[in-house]
Amino acid sequence: SAYNTTSYLFKHSLQKMAVKLESLKRTNNISSVLVTSVFESEGKTTISSNLACALAAEGNRVASVDVDFKCPSVYKRFKAASDTNEHDIARYIKCELSFEDVVQYDSESNVYIFCNSKRYENSFENMRLG
């Protein structure tokens, strides 16, 4: 997984963040974290995938969800994630696949992955049902 190849300081920072999130989970009943930004290439995938691995390493049950239809990249960070559209969220939204068919499990990082691997340039048009 991506987490195993990160620098010590970055990994340590993610571990500290995971501990803080674990504390929030216990005290405020928080069960989800959203990583987002306005612009491309600001590190959303790097932070979210590595944070998912850090949380999973602490024994948490973790799912990484990438709903970027124009430039998906989470699938590249996990060995178990398919680089075909065989498991794409888009196919789930169109009712072509069941939820179980879409979710992939990365045993190396203990993270469940729910993402796209195919680019959808006109995502709204392609996601239309029926």
Image (cartoon, rainbow, N blue to C red):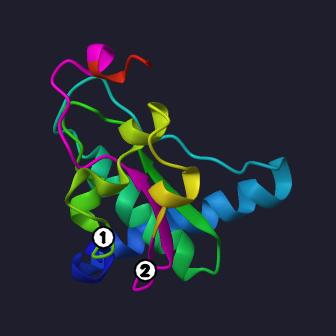
Number of other residues with Cα within 10 Å of mark 1, as a class: few under 14, some 14 to 19, many 20 or more = many
Q: Is residue 31 magenta?
A: no
Q: Residue 103: image x %, image y %?
A: 49, 59
Quadrant where the N terminus sits is bottom left
| Type of the residue with mark 1 | Phe
Residue of label 2: 109
Q: Residue at x 73, y 54 (%)?
A: 24
Quadrant where the C terminus sits is top left
Residue 49 in the figure: left or right of residue 111: left
What is the number of the mark on residue 87? none
Secondary structure of residue under mark 1: loop
Up/down of 9 relative to 76, above or below: below
Q: Residue 43: image x %, image y %?
A: 24, 46
Q: Residue at x 26, y 73 (%)?
A: 2
Q: Quadrant of residue 12?
A: bottom left
Residue of label 1: 78
- Can residue 15 be seen? no
* Residues drawn in magenta: 105-125
The one nearer the camera, 108 or 80, is 80
The one nearer the camera, 112 or 85, is 85
- Can residue 63 be seen? yes
Q: CA distance from mark 2 to mark 1?
A: 8 Å
* Earlier sequence position, callout 2 versus callout 1: 1
Q: Residue at x 18, y 37 (%)?
A: 71
Number of other residues with Cα within 10 Å of mark 2, as a class: few under 14, some 14 to 19, many 20 or more = many
| Type of the residue with mark 2 | Ser
- Give yes or no for contact between labels 2 and 1 (Cβ–Cβ under 8 Å): yes
Q: Residue 97: image x %, image y %?
A: 47, 47
Secondary structure of residue under mark 2: loop
